[in-house]
Image (cartoon, grey):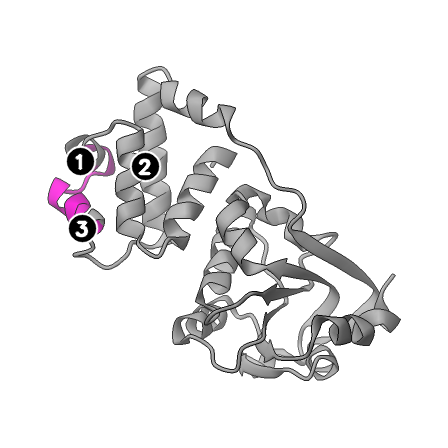
């Protein structure tokens, strides 16, 4: 998928109301439910049910096909909508606070350094190696960063910890990780949710499905950085 398609797919997948987001983009591209249904080889009532919230939110694969269909229909019309959207398509570059380690830190040691509890895949902690970390403002990433820019959060290597701040329940950060893997084919070795003591079950299920240890901690960012100092380049 090209950057614009990936961004649209990411917005739909991350939306609290995917059906409304699907409808918005269909209408932006000027495509009827019938046209889209024909392109996807499904019934128009299925499209209507998705958009009206009467059907379970589509998975990433369905969203990708939907966006590709919108792009293909627009291409057949001269790509007028895509060209207009790309004029205002600007990446964000100041969201991620990235640090690299001079040597690997095993997952269990990493969790101990930040006083974290592992709430998903604790058995994998002893298997993973962490070569750096990225501190991420969850709200800024979800609201401001195009999905194709998610690659920047991985710094020099995806074998790192993603530490999410401004976390509510943990669902949105884990959806972002899942969507980011779909876009970049990368996944972190560890995800840390900062400042919460209870995690959304959906976030745990995503972590389990992606086989990523999921940690929670209330240690201050300043104290975390001090704990990491001896390992940093």
Q: Is residue 93 above or below residue 109?
A: above
Q: Earlier in the sequence, mark 3 or mark 1?
A: 1
The tag earlier along the polypeptide, 2 or 1, is: 2
Q: Quadrant of residue 14?
A: bottom left
Please indicate whether residue 24 sits to the left or right of residue 124 in the image: left
Mark 3 or 2, nearer chain start: 2
Q: Nearer the viewer, residue 102 or 137?
A: 137
Res 131 quadrant in image: bottom right
Which residue carries the number 1 mark? Answer: 33
**Camera-side residue of 216 and 47:** 216
The residue positioned 27% from the left and 35% from the top of the image is 26
Residue 233: image x %, image y %? Answer: 87, 61
Question: Pointer 2: what residue?
Answer: 25
CA distance separating discs 2 and 1: 12 Å
Mark 3 and mark 2 residues within 8 Å of each other at the beta carbon: no
Q: How many marks can you see?
A: 3
State the image coordinates of residue 140 (x, y, percent, origin top left). Answer: 55, 53
- Magenta span: chief secondary structure: helix
Label 2 sits on a secondary structure element that is helix
Within 10 angstroms of label 2, few (less than 14), some, or many (20 or more) residues?
some
User: What segment carries the magenta color?
Assistant: 37-50
Q: Is residue 98 above or below residue 103?
A: above
Element on which disc 3 rests: loop
**Is residue 120 in sight in this rendering?**
no
Q: Which mark is residue 92?
A: none
Does dot 1 land on a helix, a strand or a loop?
Answer: helix
Query: From the viewer's perspective, is residue 227 above or below residue 135?
Result: below
Q: Read off the residue under disc 3.
A: 52
């Amino acid at each position: 998928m090209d950057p614009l398609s990936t961004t649209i797919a990411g917005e739909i997948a991350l939306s609290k109301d995917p059906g409304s987001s699907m409808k918005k983009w269909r209408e932006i591209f000027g495509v009827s439910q019938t046209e889209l249904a024909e392109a996807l080889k499904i019934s128009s009532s299925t499209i209507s049910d998705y958009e009206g919230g009467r059907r379970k939110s589509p998975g990433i694969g369905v969203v990708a096909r939907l966006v590709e269909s919108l792009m293909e229909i627009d291409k057949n019309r001269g790509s007028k909508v895509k060209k207009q959207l790309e004029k205002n398509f600007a990446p964000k570059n100041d969201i991620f606070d990235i640090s690299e380690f001079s040597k690997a830190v095993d997952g269990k040691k990493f969790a101990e350094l930040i006083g974290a509890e592992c709430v998903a895949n604790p058995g994998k902690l002893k298997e993973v190696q962490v070569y750096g970390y990225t501190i991420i403002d969850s709200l800024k990433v979800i609201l401001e960063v195009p999905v194709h820019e998610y690659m920047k959060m991985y710094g020099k290597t995806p074998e790192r910890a993603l530490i999410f701040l401004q976390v509510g329940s943990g669902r949105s950060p884990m959806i972002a990780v899942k969507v980011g893997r779909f876009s970049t084919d990368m996944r972190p070795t560890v995800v840390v949710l900062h400042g919460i003591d209870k995690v959304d079950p959906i976030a745990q299920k995503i972590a389990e499905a992606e086989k990523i240890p999921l940690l929670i901690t209330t240690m201050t960012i300043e104290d975390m950085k001090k704990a990491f100092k001896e390992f940093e380049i």
